[in-house]
Each structure stands twice: as C-alpha cells, then as structure tokens.
Amino acid sequence: DAKTTQPTSMDCAEGRAANLPCNHSTISGNEYVYWYRQIHSQGPQYIIHGLKNNETNEMASLIITEDRKSSTLILPHATLRDTAVYYCIVRVVTRGNSQGGKLIFGQGTELSVKP
Amino acid sequence: NAGVTQTPKFRVLKTGQSMTLLCAQDMNHEYMYWYRQDPGMGLRLIHYSVGEGTTAKGEVPDGYNVSRLKKQNFLLGLESAAPSQTSVYFCASSLRVVGDDTQYFGPGTRLTVL
C-alpha cells in the first residue's frame, strides 16, 4: 500500500468546515483512499473512502485530485465531538486475503475543534 | 445491531497468567482481525481470519493464539502473559468485497500485565 503524508495537527473553529489534507503521491491505479478517525480511547471509526471520484456521505466529503496524488477530507460543520485523530490510508481492495487486510495507520492528523 | 463488541473492557493480569479476549460481530462479516495499539503508535495486526475455521498470522503474532469456531466470534488468547503485552486490543470485522474493505472496530480491551 502506498505511503501517505498528513499534517501532524490542525485546529478548527466549531461550526466551520474542517479540511484535512493527505498526500499520497505514489498511489497506484487500483488503490483506494480510506479515511478513519479515532476519538481518544475509542476504536477507530470508518468515515469514507473513494477511488477517483469525489464522494459524500452523512459524515463527510472526500475530494480526490484528478491525478490522485492527494485528497482532502471535509467535515462541513465541525463540532466539538469531531475532535479526534484522522487517518488517511491508501490500500488495494481485492477479494481474497492478500496482505491479510492489514490497515496501516500512520501518525494521522490530530484535529482539535475549538468553541 | 450491536456491530462489533469486545469482552472484557478492562483486565489486569499478572505475568504468566492466561486469558481470552472475546470479539463478537452481528453483521455476518467474513473477515475478522485483532490489532494492538501501544501509546503513540498506530494499530498493529496480530492475527486475522478470512472465514469460520481459518486463521492466519499478522505482523506481531508471537505470544498470541486465536480461534474462529463460529463466524460471528473471534477469540484472542494469551497463554502466558508478559508485561510487553500491556496494550489496548481492538477487534475489527469486514465484508471485504471488491471495492469495499471497510473495517468496523470494537471499543477495545485495555489490558495491563504486571
């Protein structure tokens, strides 16, 4: 799976949009971009994933650049409960047990939402 | 729909004691995983299972054993606990179809080995 680079930390004002960038310049054509977050002491939580098109769900939007070398996770109206570490993960998704399905969590971005 | 549950939430062991961590999922997922997370580090895969009756080693399997006798349950065993196994343990499950390998995590088990 390709390596990702994220800022160590970010701040966001409550109610404003939080834009979390991720660089994955070595991504290959069959690798998906996944975002998870981990609120302190809790299990990681899936947020969203995509291949090349922009995606939106009830939690967030994922914007992937045309060359797929970077992406941005957007939380449209951040709340205090969105304070967490956000992980950008790039992985191949195929049927079968190649690599054991291991998720490689890097350091992530520590997002602090402030009142 | 409880998702992924883990039992127990907390446990303190003495060196050399044994215990079993239970993970259960009610989403009919084929794939299940056990990770450990140490302070300041990401999750590391211990063992995983691609279906009932099958298990495989992850990146840090030493000192642990697993069993998947039923599709919905994945057990992680420590035969002789060591202080180095003090960690937070997370279980996860996924369907793992082409295009979607979303893993759903349990709340974790915090284990301390004295």
Image (tube, rainbow, N blue to C red):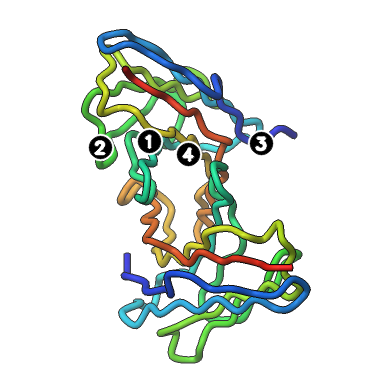
Q: Is residue A102 visible?
A: no
Q: Reading the chain from its start, which is encountered first: label 2 or label 1?
A: 1
Give the percent coordinates (x, y) of residue A51.
51, 74
What amino acid is labelled 2 in the image? Val
Classify the position of the N terminus of chain B by image quarter: top right
Report helix, strand or loop for mark 1.
strand
Q: Which image quarter holds the C terminus of chain B?
A: top left
Residue A84 vs residue B34, the one in the foreground: A84
Distance of label 3 from label 4 (alpha carbons): 14 Å
Q: Which residue is mark 3?
A: B3
Q: Residues within 10 Å of mark 4 (few under 14, many from 20)?
A: many
Mark 2 near mark 1, Cβ–Cβ under 8 Å? no
Please identify the residue farthest to the top as the structure is shown. B17
Judging by the rendered image, the residue that carries numbered circle 1 is B48
Q: Which one is in front in this view, the residue at disc 4 or the one at disc 2?
A: 2
Check disc 1 and give the amino acid type. Tyr
Among the two numbered marks 1 and 4 on one chain, the one whose residue lies closer to the N terminus = 4
Residue at 49% over, 35% down: B91
The image position of residue A38, as x and y in percent, is: 54, 52
Q: Image quadrant of residue B87? A: top left
* Labels 4 and 2 in the same subunit: yes
Residue beneath label 4, please?
B31
Q: Between residues A93 and A72, which one lies in front from this camera angle?
A: A72
Classify mark 2: residues with Cα within 10 Å, few (<14), some (14-19) or many (20+): few
User: Disc 2 marks which residue?
Assistant: B60
